[in-house]
Amino acid sequence: MSLKTVEAVKNDIPVTDNKSEEDRVISFKDAIFEATDQAMARDPRVFVMGEGVDDPTGVFGTTKGLQDKYGTERVFDTPIAENSLTGFAAGAAMAGLRPILIHSRMDFMILSLDQLVNHACKWSYMFHGQVKVPLVVRTISARGWGAGAQHSQCIQGMLMSVPGLKIAAPATPYDAKGLLISSILDDSPVLFVEHRWLYKTTGRVPESLYSIPFGTGAVRRPGSDVTIVAVSYMQKEALKAAEELETEDHISAEVIDPRTLKPLDEKIIFGSLAKTGRLIIADTGNRTGGAASEIAAVVSEKAFSLLKKPIVRIGCPDAPTPASEILEKAYYPDSGTIRREAIRLMK
């Protein structure tokens, strides 16, 4: 493939949100693998780098076997040097390649913020749009299995304030594949947030290549009494809560999955609020200054007249993550948390 065919590649991939093409069911991790494999097969500029990408497990299976297929020049392990590696990837993107940099722990991405925030996200602006930085940063976030304070964080809310950075947070295998393809084709830096507990979840995913436009949310469950905007893994908990609210409490909850945080689909949230007037925002990060706070601010600023009750934000407490299993259960919000807040809003 010629190095001048990026637009041809984009135009050849359907932009779609239609799940009816196939009934094939695969896991979230396999959807990420398939998107990466297909993107690499179509475009020789795409390469994968990161700690453990060539390990036997291949980053939870998302890169397993890619080095054997594409060679060590396009799939390679890296040292534990996050800031340097992010600069390396950003420079490669600036030079015309399309790197996928994998941070196996979102916590350690903090070490790379200088290169990501001060350089990769600024270069296109500083060079008057003459330079593109098509960099995808895949990062694995959130709770593990007693992973503790330094291996469990979700900092997507912190990074929403960075100009020039797009943020995707898929919650289904279908969205994982479609949004990763969109991220690879994008000419701007993209943070692709993957919640660890989603990897084994399954769903219908077409085998053919497709993309999902940024800034298009999805209604996962229609409802009329309360709107629940659920980010990433919290969509699973929101759907569970909505089912219980319907059967046990006779409350109809509409569940909205934003899918991307930057850009955010404001219209789908406002449209739901026009029906319900009540809003719960559930995020996997900390409550203060997180994604839920930013979404709440947008609604307060642009759709305040639609609200019947104050907005409810649900997130992790403003405290380091405990390693104890018992304390973890108290620390992380779940479907029960969402259900209690919905009942309170309806009083």
Image: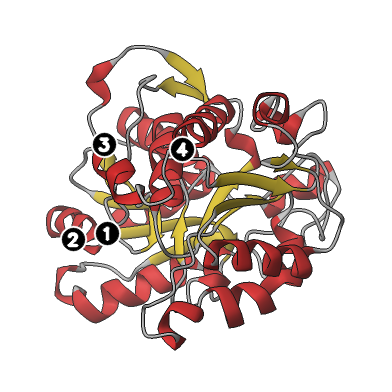
Residue 144: quadrant of the picture? top right
- Please report contact status of discs 2 and 1: CB closer than 8 Å, yes or no: yes
Q: Is residue 18 left or right of residue 66?
A: left
Q: How many marks?
A: 4
Residue 221 versus residue 170 in the image, above or below:
above
Q: Is residue 88 left or right of residue 37?
A: right
| Chain-order first, disc 3 or disc 2 | 3
Residue at left offset 39%, top offset 22%: 205
Q: Is residue 179 visible?
A: yes
User: Separation of disc 2 and disc 1 at Cα?
Assistant: 6 Å
Instruction: Say what secondary structure mark 1 lies in.
Output: loop
* Viewer-nearest of discs 1 and 4: 4
* Viewer-nearest of discs 4 and 2: 4
User: Separation of disc 4 and disc 2 at Cα?
Assistant: 22 Å
* Viewer-nearest of discs 4 and 3: 3
Q: Amino acid at mark 4?
A: Ala
| Chain-order first, disc 4 or disc 2 | 4
Residue 71 versus residue 120 in the image, above or below:
above
Number of residues whose C-alpha sits closer than 10 Å to that of mark 1, classed few (under 14), some (14–19) or many (20 or more): some
- Please report contact status of discs 4 and 3: CB closer than 8 Å, yes or no: no
User: Separation of disc 3 and disc 1 at Cα?
Assistant: 25 Å
Instruction: Say what secondary structure mark 2 lies in.
Output: helix
Q: How is the image coloured?
A: secondary structure
Q: Amino acid at mark 3?
A: Asp
Residue 126 versus residue 268 in the image, above or below:
below
Q: Going by the picture, which residue comes out furthest to the top? A: 23
User: Separation of disc 3 and disc 2 at Cα?
Assistant: 28 Å
Q: Which mark is residue 176?
A: 4
